[in-house]
Image (spheres, rainbow, N blue to C red):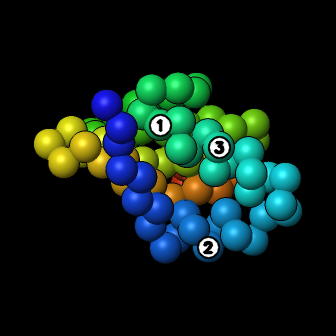
Amino acid sequence: MKYRIVIEKRAERFILKQPKDVQTRLLRAIYRLPFAGDIKPLKGREGLLRLRVGTYRVIYTVEQEIITVRVLDAGNRGQIYDRYS
């Protein structure tokens, strides 16, 4: 089953600010969601998941009923969790 990927503005801005090689790594990992990657639920936040891509983290949700992965945010490991704690 193919999931539709929706990247929210906040995540898109972060990704576009990165060097080309990092952009490529992040986007490749995102487009393999929700089945592949280092994925864990975000503690204390029901329904949110995190994807680890090196030192970067991608926060997303999976909307099963409409077969969509919604990428909410992306950032450096030390900063991203502060926004979701």
Which residue bears the numbered disc 3?
28
User: Residue 63 appears at what percent x and percent y?
Assistant: 24, 45
> Could you give the CA–CA distance between mark 3 and mark 2, rounded to whole angstroms?
16 Å
Q: In which quarter of the image is the N terminus?
A: top left
> Could you give the CA–CA distance between mark 1 and mark 3, rounded to whole angstroms?
9 Å
Of the two numbered discs 3 and 2 on the same chain, state the one appearing first in sequence: 2
Front position in the image: 27 or 71: 27
Label 1 crowd bin: few (<14), some (14–19), many (20+), radius 10 Å: many
SS at mark 2?
helix
Label 2 crowd bin: few (<14), some (14–19), many (20+), radius 10 Å: few
Of the two numbered discs 1 and 2 on the same chain, state the one appearing first in sequence: 2
Which residue bears the numbered disc 1?
33
Confirm or deny contact between disc 3 and disc 2 (CB under 8 A).
Answer: no
Which residue bears the numbered disc 2?
13
Q: Which residue is drawn at 57% across and 68% down?
A: 12
Front position in the image: 12 or 77: 12
Asked if residue 55 is positioned above or below residue 5 in the image, the reply reads: above
Given the image, on which type of amino acid does mark 1 rest?
A: Leu
- Residue 77 can be seen in this image: no
Q: Residue at x 48, y 48 (%)?
A: 59
